């Protein structure tokens, strides 16, 4: 599925719809360049889950946990990760295979440990379409 947005609000609303319908145990991977809108999308998902607390990229920790919504929300940003071992140290599999919703910014950096079943979200710019244009591709992945 490909969705085009033309403002941060539209990307937020798309995330919000996904947050409203997300099911326990789902893992969303988020890829796209710096400043493309991964965190804006994430804030929408959090809002859709009923989280009112401000959500920003976890800068000093790999994962930020929000318990306030309809389901637990685990927001990862692995941009600064040096080694997969850092994921093991935080016990990532409890999150990936738990009953909450995982959302992983820069998931491509940890592709070796991603669950076989996940929902991939890729956000891209196309400057020919304008500065605020984003093309958002959402696809279900099931490796075996
Ligand atoms: P990332 O987390 O991918 O590094 P952010 O979500 O932090 O990016 O920032 C995205 C920036 O792009 C914000 O400043 C936002 O206002 C801007 N922006 C402009 N148009 C859009 C759009 N259509 N969707 C999302 N963000 C947009
Ligand atoms: Mg971000």
Image: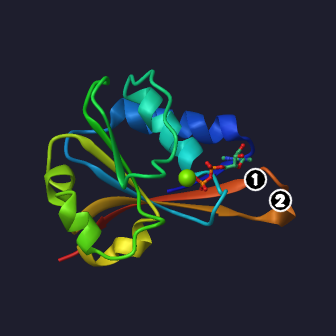
Q: CA distance from mark 1 to mark 2?
A: 6 Å
> What residue is shown at x 39% (from left), y 75% (from top)?
82
Q: Secondary structure at mark 2?
A: helix
How was this image coloured?
Answer: rainbow
Residue 27 vs 116, above or below: the answer is above
Q: Mark 2 and mark 1 in contact (Cβ < 8 Å)? A: yes
Residue 29 in view: yes
Q: Residue at x 37, y 28 (%)?
A: 49
* Residue 110 percent location from the top left of the image: 34, 72
Residue 111 found in image quarter: bottom left
Does the beta carbon at disc 1 come under 8 Å from ligand 1? yes
Q: In the rendering, at what x and y percent does residue 139 appear?
A: 41, 61
Q: Is residue 117 left or right of residue 16?
A: left
Residue beneath disc 1: 133
Q: Which mark is residue 129?
A: 2
Residue 132 vertical placement versus 80 (above, below): above
Where residue 90 sits, quadrant-wise, is bottom left
Identify the element where label 1 is drawn: loop
Badge 2 local density, few (<14 within 10 Å), some, or many (20+)? few
110 left or right of 90?
A: right
């Amino acid at each position: 599925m490909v969705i085009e947005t033309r403002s941060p609000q539209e990307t937020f609303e798309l995330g919000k719809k996904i947050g409203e319908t997300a099911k326990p145990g789902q893992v969303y991977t988020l890829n796209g360049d710096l400043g493309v809108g991964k965190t804006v999308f994430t804030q929408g998902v959090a809002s859709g889950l009923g989280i009112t607390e401000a959500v920003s990229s976890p800068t000093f920790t790999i994962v930020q946990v929000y318990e306030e919504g309809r389901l637990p929300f685990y927001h990862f940003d692995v941009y600064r990760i040096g080694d997969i071992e850092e994921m093991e140290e935080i016990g990532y599999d409890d999150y990936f295979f738990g009953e909450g919703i995982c959302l992983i910014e820069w998931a491509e950096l940890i592709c070796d440990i991603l669950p076989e079943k996940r929902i991939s979200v890729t956000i891209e710019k196309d400057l020919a379409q304008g500065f605020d244009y984003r093309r958002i591709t959402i696809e279900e992945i099931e490796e075996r």
